[in-house]
Image: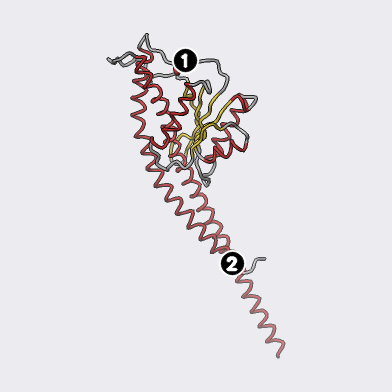
Amino acid sequence: MASLRDIKNRINSTKKTSQITKAMQMVSAAKMSRAEMNAKSFVPYMEKIQDVTASIALGSADASHPMLVSRPVKKTGYVVITSDRGLAGAYNSSILKAVYQTIQKRHKSNDEYVIIAIGRMALDFFKGKGANVILDIVGVADQPSFAEIKDIASKTVGMFSDENFDELYIYYSHYISAISQEVTSKKILPLTEITNGSDKLTSYEFEPSAEEILKVLLPQYAESLIYGALLDSKASEHAARMTAMKNATDNASDLINQLDLSYNRARQAAITQEITEIVGGAAALE
């Protein structure tokens, strides 16, 4: 049986850990609120650029662009968005598991796919698996700006145009609510399924030609898809970490209660033993 000092030390250390997890929970809650706002505020922009792009691409007979055309798939690209740190429950493992299972089903060798890793967890995971990580970025801010990821987004789109890979998918955690996140995959390139979300296309008057506009607009649209997924993923990350830290704090409280009970029982046993020894010694003197 553990001594009173050992139990007391465990109680103190658990209380200190509980204070840390509680603080981390509160920090993550504040970050989640702001990240959720960022993700939602980006939605109107995405809807508008999607409407414009779809209307020009589908409504103009002379509109053509390599990003709108499917080609024989020799190599596939995967953009994988994770966090740089752990302590977020199953947030990272769920994404990595989904991507890796998909890769194992679709590909027979590492030469058939490439990885664009956003987040240290994705980078370390796929490097450990021997995958070909052609681009990576770590240290993305909790509230990222487009400027931070523009370089990797534009390079990713450029690699598709240069035929380094023939299709591109993105995997991330979609934010539903503070207690619910869902691993999501989207096909980013080619943009063969682009739609404005309704049966009617908006009519625009534009110059120069539709083809010239699409040369500028389509890469921006694909880059925006990556940035929007990153904002969504950041909200999920903070929500997952907040939930994980709350569970850790609750578990610490339960453990402290159990340790307090054990401590009181051990102290009561020690007092009873001392009384028994005193009574026994007094009886021996009579």
Could you say which disc has been placed on residue 263 in the image? 2
Residue 100 is labelled as none
Q: Residue furthest front?
A: 162
Out of 218 and 169, give the one closest to the viewer: 218
Q: Position of residue 114 (x, y in %)?
A: 56, 28
Report the amino acid beneath label 1. Val
Please give the name of the residue rendered at 39% of the width and 21% of the height, measured from the top-left corner: 218
Which residue is rendered at x = 27% and y = 15% of the image? 205
Disc 2: CA contacts within 10 A as few (<14), some (14-19) or many (>=20):
many
**Mark 2 or mark 1: which comes first in sequence?**
1
Quarter assignment of residue 13: bottom right
Q: Is residue 159 left or right of residue 8?
A: left
- Element at badge 1? loop
Q: Is residue 18 left or right of residue 218?
A: right
Quadrant of the rendered structure where residue 286 is? bottom right
Residue with the most extreme top position:
61
Residue 135 placement (x, y as % from top left): 51, 33
Which amino acid, by three-letter code, is at mark 2?
A: Tyr
- C-alpha gap between disc 2 and disc 1: 71 Å
Q: Are marks 2 and 1 in contact (CB under 8 Å)?
A: no
Quarter of the rendering occupied by the N terminus: bottom right
Q: Residue at x 62, y 38 (%)?
A: 128
* Residue named by callout 1: 69
Q: In this view of the protein, which residue sits in the foreground, 136 or 251?
A: 136
Towards the viewer: 91 or 251 = 91
Q: Measuring from the top left, give residue 162's x and y in whole percent.
A: 49, 21
Q: Specify few, some or many for label 1: CA neighbours under 10 Å numbering under 14, 14-19, or 20 or more.
A: few
* Residue 66 or residue 32, whichever sits in front: 66
Colouring mode (rainbow / by chain / secondary structure / one colour): secondary structure
